[in-house]
Image (cartoon, helix red, strand yellow):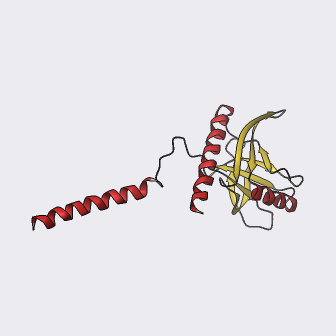
Amino acid sequence: MRFLRLSGWLGLIALSLVAAGCGSGSSKKKNYPVTVARFMMEASDREVGSLIRLPISGSTISVLPKTYFTEYDITKCEVVDNELGKCLYFQFTEQAARDLYRLTATNQGRRLITTVNGAAVGAVRFDRPISQGFVITYVETPVGELEAMAKNINLTSADARKEAEKKR
């Protein structure tokens, strides 16, 4: 009887160790703030969209419910400086670059809205097809926060692509 109790406890301990080991890889805590950048398309006058508001300008834009580009599509995010100020440069994967070209070729005059962690932060209007595989967008975020935002977007996107690759 005593042996059965002891083996039951040992079995329970072994089971808990196995369960703890199984979850350890997937619940690894990130050592940076997860910063998810995604891109949505402006809805046309004939399409039903949801209204989003940019945080500083207060501009409202009707967007389609579909996310066109996600953290899995971003290979690089950098802060760049040009004549109009600082902005974010997003480089996409080869597949996403082809999708970006098709999207911008058929939707000229519309805007691509950048969201970070679900909040709209910027928009860029297409006046021609984008064939280079990158988007430059001005974001309504304090300039002092842009470097950290870009760094965390890079880390989040790289980890997301690595995790997706492991699952394949």
Q: How many marks?
A: 0
| Residue that lies at the very extreme toward the left in this rendered image | 1
Task: Give the residue at x 63% y 48%.
Answer: 158
Q: Position of residue 102 (x, y in %)?
A: 83, 61
| Residue that lies at the very extreme toward the right in this rendered image | 128
Can you say which quadrant of the picture contains the N terminus? bottom left
Q: Where is residue 17 in the image (x, y as percent from the top left)?
A: 32, 56
Between 46 and 126, the one lying in front of the other is 126
Task: Give the residue at x 20% y 61%.
Answer: 9
* Above or below, comparing residue 55 to residue 143 in the picture: below
Between 54 and 10, the one lying in front of the other is 10
Q: Where is residue 35 in the image (x, y as percent from the top left)?
A: 60, 46
Is 130 situated left or right of 18 in this image? right
* Above or below, comparing residue 97 to residue 146 in the picture: below
Is 160 situated left or right of 73 in this image? left
Task: Give the residue at x 79% y 54%.
Answer: 111
Q: Position of residue 90 (x, y in %)?
A: 74, 46
Name which quarter of the figure residue 83 lies in. Answer: top right
Can you say which quadrant of the picture contains the C terminus? bottom right
